[in-house]
Structures are given as C-alpha cells and as structure tokens.
Image (cartoon, rainbow, N blue to C red):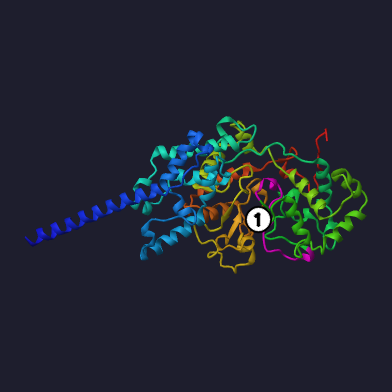
Amino acid sequence: MRSSTITKGIAGLVALGVVAWGGTVTYLEHFDHAGAPQLPASSPTRQDPTAMAAFAALREVRCDYCHTQNVELPFYFKLPLANQIMKRDLVQGQRHFEYAPVLTALQDGKPPSVEQLSRIEEVITQNRMPPAAYLLMHPHAHLDEKQRADILKWVREQRERYYATPGVAAQFRGEPIQPIPESVDVNWKKAELGRALFFDKGLSGDGTLNCASCHGLNKGGVDNLTTATGIGGQKGPINVPTVYNSVFSMAQFWNGRAKDLAEQAAGPVMNPLEMGSHDWNTVADHVRSTPGYAEQFNAAFGSDQIDKDTITGAIAEYEKTLITPDSRFDLYLKGDAKAITAQEKRGYERFKEIGCSGCHSGIAVGGDAYEILGLEGPYFENRHTKLTAADEGRMAVTHQEGDRERFKVPNLRNVELTGPWLHDGSATTLEQVVREMARYETPDHDIADQDVTDIVAFLKTLTGKYEGIPLKDVSADQPLRAPASN
C-alpha cells in the first residue's frame, strides 16, 4: 500500500514536471517567434527564395540570442543560477561568432563576408548548432535536414554569385576556396617605381635594410625567422607575414592596424625595431637626391611630389603585383582533375570537415577575418612562456577586451615556404601547425596522423607562381614584368 502511494506520488510529480516543462516550452516558442529578427519590407532578400529559406531557418533558431549583443533574452536568463551559466554561454557565443553582420547583410540583401559564410557552413555541416542544452528549452529550434540543406544551399549560392573567381570550374564555384585571379588592376608606372623603393636600403635609418630584408621574394615573401630582425640586429616581437597575396587581405599586420597596403608600407620604415628611420622628410630627401627617382615620380604621379604618401603609395602598387596564381590546387579548381593527387584531394576534404576552412577560405585561404587564437582550447596557457604585447592581438588596436588574443587569420597560400609559422613563430613544421590549429581552433582536438599527413599534402598544393615562375624558383630580386601594352 505504502509502495503504491509512493509510486503514484512520483508519477504525479513527473506528470507535473512534464506539464510545467510543456507550458514553459510553449511560452518560450511564442517569445522566440515574437522577438525574432525581421526583414524590412523593402529588403531584396524577400525576392530571393533561397535566401528567404535560409533566413527562416536561422530566424527559427534565434542565433541572435547568443551571437549578438543587447538582445532581449528569455526570462530564465534572469534567474540567479541560470544567469551565471547563460552569461558564460553568451560570452562564448559572441567570442566564437558575431551574427549581427550576417543579419544586417540579409536585411540589406547583400552577401555576408567570405569568412562569415564559411563559419556558418562549418557549424551546419558539423551539426554543432544549436547546442543540446538550448534545444532542451527551445525544441522548435532544432534544425531538420531540410533546414540545414536550405542554409548550406544559400551559402553556396552566395559564393557563386559574389565570390567565384573567373575561370573556376562550374562544380567549384560554391567552394570555400577560390583560385587566385590571373591579374589585378595595377598602375604599372607606380608599380615599377614601387619596386625600386621596395629594394631601396636608403629608406632605413642606417642604409642597411629594405622591405625585402623581411619580405624576401625568394623566401615565400617572409624571412623564414621566428620573429623579424630589424635595424642593428634588434629582434622584433612577432613573426613576419607574407607579402605575397597581401592585396587580398582585409587589413594588414597580424592585428590589422594598417587598413591597406600603403599604410602597411609606412609602418616598418619608421618602426625603431624594424627599418628605424626617424622622419619622413629625411626619407623623402634621400629619394629626391637619388638619380632617376624624380623622373619616375613624375611618370607615375604626374608631379615631382615626393613624400610619405607617394612613396608608400608606390610601394603598395608594387605589392599588388605580388600575387601567385596557378598553384596546382588552382588548376584543380579550374577543372584539371589530375592536377592534385588522391591524397591531396582527401586532405582538402578533411580540411573542410574538421573545420579549417571555417577560417581559412576565400582567394588567399585566409586574410579576410579576425579570429581568436585558442578558440577551442587554451593555446596561451599551454605555451609555458611569458605573454608579450604582441600576444594581445587585435585588442592593441581596438582596446576591446573581446579582441584579446584575436588575430587576422593568416593566408595559407604558399604556406610550405613561409615557416616558421603562427604569430609567435613557435611552429617549426607544417605538421605541428596542423595539429595545433586542430587542437586549439576546432572541436577535433586530436586528429589522426593520417589526417595530418593528408592535410599537409593538400597545403603544399597551394604553392603558386609569380609572373609565371614557380615560387620556389623566384630570385631574391625578381624583375617586374609589366604588360607589353604598358
């Protein structure tokens, strides 16, 4: 009798709990739908069925809860214990991905960035979002196969429409990586002048260094040192990024402090640890006094104005020519199925499946986003070395705590030639890079040895050509060959 009473009591409590949970879930579904993001009536997205299907799926999930700021959250976010748990999730959500720019793009009928599309593709393909804990209270937000397919179709269509490179094979127009174009728009008179300045040691404080000292054309556009060596043998705090294909980057330097190539060119000249000049008037005086420059500046700029702006503008124009198309992987993307091996194709597929392409995408296979180093694991805690100002990353520019340890994603073109790798130059082999990035940047913390081998094989297919010459064979002072019509 007593046992039966206890059983009935437990059953009653369970039933009461189910009713309470059901009522809460019903309320939350109404709350989620009522506050969900909307498209303006004038939004071009409304005329795009594929984009509308993706928007409907993303809206149902309410990605904005955890991946944007200042959103009205469900009531349980305000409960004492739940608030602590949810606050942590919100911080991590916004640390991992900012959804607001994607929402704005959809509302305006414009494409999200290459990297934003790749990040969305990554988590949808891996079925990582939304998380199970969230679905417990928001079961309507579970993405079914059709919704996931709708989002992935939209991602590919956005790439095909806005980011596909001319010449890419039809079946690869929606891929996260696109071939490097054969050329970019260049003012060749400025570029020829810029090349002379790029190799001019007179721009440094003691006449011993030039741009090529750190960015060797015969070294993959870097110096192959752990960190840069500057004037007087001083050691810089950070690894040298490659100058090749830098024209495709959203900004310059690891922390993005230079908005374009001209601003980047100005930085090292005055940096006391790099080229160590003291002021631009002195640099300009050197250029004016060098035979031949006055005529080149007149030809390039239509005047004899020689100053910081024209000097860095010319160097930037030359750096625009430093693109490396026609890698074996580019040839594969253009339709040559035999350009890469079966192992290299397998490596590319694993590169995507593990999540590497979530950050390393686009023409340069990187360079178009900032990401936290240690997104999925304690990279800096495991280094066992003292942190430096260079480890702050983007925060040094924005002074926002959320940008601490956030760096511009390096481009992976010609990566086999640009070691040692990472911002601190701590990785000495490509195998180490692949293992560490998988461990600290993806959910697959310990990938198989075969995966490492295959991905490294794929990465080596990204080595291209400069002006038709395989990059491994480019000379330290490779001439610039302007088009015959120039």
Q: Which quadrant of the figure contains the C terminus?
A: top right
In this picture, residue 92 sits left or right of residue 236: left
Q: Quadrant of residue 373?
A: bottom right
Start and end of the magenta stretch? 231-250
Q: Residue at x 84, y 56 (%)?
A: 201
Q: Amino acid at mark 1?
A: Gly
Residue closer to the observer: 130 or 254: 130
What residue do we see at 82% from left, 64% from top? 278
Q: Main secondary structure of the magenta part?
A: loop
Residue 221 lies left or right of residue 458; in this view the side is right
Residue 450's x, y, as percent?
Answer: 51, 46
- Near-viewer residue (210 or 150): 150
Percent coordinates x, y for residue 275 in the rendering: 79, 61
What residue is shown with label 1? 256
Q: Quadrant of residue 3?
A: bottom left
Farthest residue to the bottom: give it: 386
Q: Residue at x 92, y 55 (%)?
A: 289
